[in-house]
Amino acid sequence: MTITILPADHLACLACGIAAMPGTTETFISIGRLAQPGRPRMAANERSEYFELTRCPGCEQTRQQAAALVAEHPVVAHRLGTAAVERLEAGLGVLRLLGARTPRLTSARDVLRFVDHMSTAGALVRWSRRYTPVALSDAQDEDCNEAPWEHATEADRQTARDALAGLLAAVNERPAPIPCPDPSGGCMLCGIASVEALPSRAAHAWTPATANPSPLGGRPSNKRLSGHLCPTCATACDTVGSIGPTAMERALMAALGVRRKSLTPTELVGLKAWAVMPEASPNRRPWGHIEHVEALRTVLA
């Protein structure tokens, strides 16, 4: 890494670190310095330092690309808040560091997935990390790189490569059966044994839950049931706000694909969750433990 002195009237690019004529500038605040042998500690009122950085033309173009993508997909700003552009810009900076092509970013889902995999690596490798939140012991405001990204260490570059590899794997992965992690082997309500989900999201495919057996159609007991909910049943419970008859009927009708919002008291009689049927094996289809469940589709339609 070769650190050189900025030419007159220039600032360092906050991303790649090369000297650039100031355009839009940003101020970075250091709350202190990393310890260095022989260097006295800064007094409490002297610890904060301010560093002015800008963007070179190439990194400014990356910033504009990030802003355009966020404007094109409002869901991204809704999900990520005010940091949306900055996080996307940081991720795109990784591509500049590695000389990699920009992957497909044609939907909000594409952009959010990109940010999820790339933004952390991008933030860690920026030149501005020399100054904030804690400045390197030898960092000076007149420092800059001779060549773009020259400050990035091999460890930084490996982190960037790993992030890109993870993104490409996520882009190319396909849904696969994710078995219920509970030892009993099925969703507490519908009894389904597995759900389709992306392997990278397997840890989020099932929702842990506990419930009293009585509201699920079981015998009254002081012992609570523990298990997991599939996505359909978890959504029904979240909508209702509890695990009980109303959530079960919503989950049942969602699984059957019918539009009715509720069952009549007569139809609701006998509706039991799979978790209160200890002798039942996990279901190949949702609610398979209910007799003639497929016939209900016609009855309830």
Image (spheres, rainbow, N blue to C red):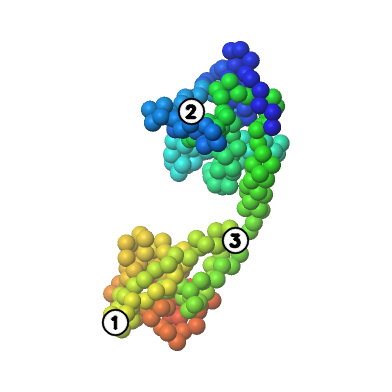
Instruction: Using the rendered view, name the quadrant where residue 9 is placed.
Output: top right
- The disc placed on residue 221 is 1
- The disc placed on residue 144 is none
Q: From the viewer's perspective, is 186 left or right of 216?
A: right
Q: Residues within 10 Å of mark 2 (few under 14, many from 20)?
A: some
Q: Residue at x 43, y 67 (%)?
A: 208
- Pick the residue in front: 53 or 170: 53
Q: Residue at x 48, y 28 (%)?
A: 28
Instruction: Using the rendered view, name the quadrant where residue 264 is placed.
Output: bottom left
Q: Amino acid at mark 2?
A: Phe
- Pick the residue in front: 63 or 22: 22
Q: Select label 3 or label 2 by which is in front.
A: 2
Identify residue for label 3.
Answer: 199
Q: Amino acid at mark 3?
A: Pro
Identify residue for label 2.
Answer: 28
Q: Secondary structure at mark 1?
A: loop
Q: Residues within 10 Å of mark 1 (few under 14, many from 20)?
A: few
User: Marks 1 and 3: in contact by CB < 8 Å?
Assistant: no
From this view, report whether residue 147 is shown above or below residue 78: above
Q: Amino acid at mark 1?
A: Ser
Q: Secondary structure at mark 2?
A: strand
Residue 100 is at least partly visible in this image: yes
Q: Quadrant of the N terminus?
A: top right
- Residue furthest to the bottom in view is 279
Q: Residue at x 30, y 78 (%)?
A: 214
From this view, report whether residue 147 is shown above or below residue 157: above
Q: Earlier in the sequence, mark 3 or mark 1?
A: 3
